[in-house]
Image: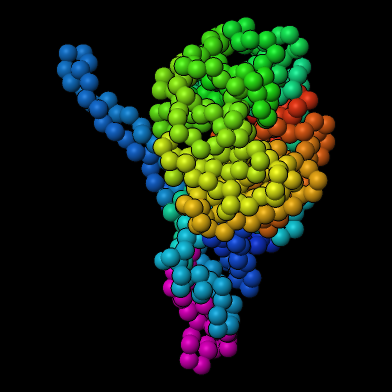
Amino acid sequence: MPIVYFNGGQEDEQSRGALLDNGVMQAFLVRRNNPTDMHFLGGHRIDDAPSYNISEGKISPEYKFLGGRNRVVEHALSDDYVKSITFNLALPNKSVSVTDMAYAIQQNCVFDLFFVPSDCESGCDEFFWYAEDVKLGTKQIQNSIIGYDESESPINIMRTMRSSSQLRTYYGMVLEEFTAATNALYSVYVLDQTQACQSCDCPFQTIVRVGAGDEGAAPDVEYSDDGGATWTAIDMSAIANDMIVTDVKYFNGYLIMTYSDVADADGTDGGVAYSLGIGPAVADAIFDVATLGLQTFEILGAKLYAFGTSGEVYESCDYGATWSKMTGSPILVTIIDSDVDTSQDMIFLACEDAEAWAFDGTTWTDLSTNVNPTGGIDLISACVLRPGGIAFGGTDGYLYENWDWSGVGTGAWSSVDFGAVSIGAIESDGEGYRTLLAADETIYERSVYNKQQWEVLDATLTGNVTKIVAGYALPDEGVNYYLATTDTGELARIAKCNLCFESCGS
């Protein structure tokens, strides 16, 4: 597949335009409901770059009373976007190809199409392209069938491929450490740019990092509105000393945090802190009963659910200001981590003593027998890999995952052994085409680029990784931005090589 690059150096004008570098690309069809099931389109070729059909941005007319009469005021609902990508795939001259089989079952299986460099350098060159929900057309014979043609050329067989979505790019990942916090960090949150910034002078996403504090002091919580260059402390004096903030999220204008006296284990005291906006001092939430320590919380619909020691579960309907304890929870062990699958309205819980649970706000489903972790270990990390795809990480060094979960006993659970380590954090791009995993201080990456095999991304961190979170992707990109925290206070950005606009000028 042709790759576009510009001719000229840094000081040259680009008036000579774009040239085509016919680098060798590998194409793969990947089943949506199992991103590790990759099918190489070997023997096929693409004679030209895909063609793009552009759909113009949608405009909504609105009538307003201005200047003494009604006038039409137009509002843009969306920007221009790619409506479809179409190209011809040349088929090998044999009776059956991979695309023939995919064409036969595409009514029942959804395929995504990937272009991956066949030979690439490390770091930022490790890119791949992704076209969602590709549809294969019927075969087209381009040359004469009977008697060939005058040049005795062989028969050429083509098949159209079409995707009605934006062609998205994943870049190579590089790790860069920010200024470390004074104490251990246990969670971090990246705000959506549209939530945190509404002007040209604010080009970076806002980041909030949380964790432990000095002995005899309140926990440390800091935010950065310049992409991690500088950090400002948030007043946590409303919280008791020697507490640890274990989780943080931003919901409907409120910054909400759970805390405990012990992180990732049984606590004896804890609660929730919250503030309206990012920056003001936090207030301590009101609970109907005393808590033993909260480790994680999730947002499901308009409710917040907090989980902690001895299976405690609390719910809040007022953005974290007041909480009531839920009755009827069958979990008796500490809930350490959680993640939510919004496609199924389901929260998945990683717990002590090899227990895993699913919770939809009403019903509890025990997944422990299905996941089947090794006896006596704790599950300490949970991640929704994709809609219906779930993963848990254990202190036994195993990753347990299921790509097609939709209820008890559905889908097949598999495991990967990373050795004598703890799987402290897992994070996905939300589709399963790039996943990061932390085994103690080492971060691994699995992506379509490396054929969905786990490879060490970076092993330079000194502390054990406690959390990995994903940033927000652009419409024409996959997730190319992650943050990781460690129990020694490190905060690492794992992202593509960036060109940042420091300011836009006038």
Q: Residue furthest left?
A: 69
> Could you tell me residue 329's position as x and y percent?
49, 35
Q: Is residue 25 above or below residue 491?
A: below
Drawn side of residue 70 relative to residue 338, left or right? left
Residue found 45% across the figure and 28% down from its top: 326
Most common SS among magenta residues: loop
Taking the magenta stretch, the answer to whether it contains residue 143 is yes
Percent coordinates x, y for residue 127 in the rendering: 67, 49
For the C terminus, the quadrant is: top right
Q: x and y percent of residue 260 in the render? A: 63, 21
Q: In the picture provided, is 434 more to the left or to the right than 459?
A: left
Span highlighted in magenta in the image: 137-161
Q: Quadrant of residue 204?
A: top right
Residue at horizontal 44 percent and vertical 45 percent from the top: 344
Above or below, comparing residue 314 to residue 279 in the picture: below
* Residue 116 position within the rendered picture, expressed as x and y whole percent measured from the top left: 65, 57
Foreground of the two, 144 or 304: 304
36 is within the stretch colored magenta = no
Q: Residue at x 78, y 25 (%)?
A: 488
* Residue in the image at 48% along x and 85% along y: 144
Taking depth in this image into account, of 96 and 232 the one nearest to the observer is 232
Q: Nearer the viewer, residue 434 or 166?
A: 434
Looking at the image, residue 47 lies above or below residue 186: below
Image-quadrant location for residue 403 = bottom right
Image quadrant assignment for residue 441: top right
